Image: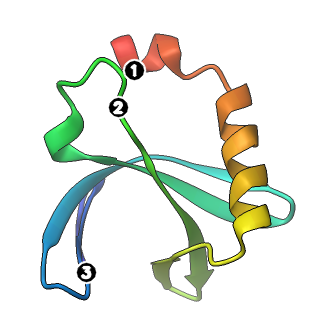
Amino acid sequence: MEEEQNIVEFTDEDGISTKCEVYDVLEFEGKSYALLLPLDDTDDDDPEFIVLEYIEEGDDCYFQSIDDEEEFDRVCEYIQSIDYDDEIEE
């Protein structure tokens, strides 16, 4: 993972790289979660976010997938309850 300002780059197990903007980091049920906006989706009127757990350990931080489907669903419901529409249009 490369980090440059609010931009991170991930490489999946197939070797495909995706650059994302860290759109927001929020607290929910005692954990931090990051909303990542793929840079190739920024022109889309209804962008699809990537949601990952955000973990800080000392000076290091990293992202981790949410493997528990129920936890992922709760986080997504919480995110949908937040009104980001005005911020996305700006």
Side of 17 where 53 appears, left or right: right
In this view of the protein, can residue 90 be seen by the observer?
A: no
Q: Residues within 10 Å of mark 1 (few under 14, many from 20)?
A: few
Residue 18 pos. (x, y %) = 18, 63
Residue at numbered disc 2? 47
Helix or strand or loop: what does disc 2 sit on? loop
Q: Which mark is residue 12?
A: 3
- Distance from disc 2 to disc 3, alpha carbons, whole Å, reads 20 Å
- In primary-sequence order, the first of circles 1 and 2 is 2
Side of 90 where 66 appears, left or right: right
67 vs 7, nearest the viewer:
67
* Quadrant, the N terminus: bottom left
Check whether the beta carbons of the residues at disc 1 and disc 2 lie within 8 A of each other.
Answer: yes
The residue located at (21%, 37%) in the rendering is 41
Q: Which mark is residue 11?
A: none
Residue 77 pos. (x, y %) = 74, 40
Residue at numbered disc 1? 88
- In primary-sequence order, the first of circles 2 and 3 is 3
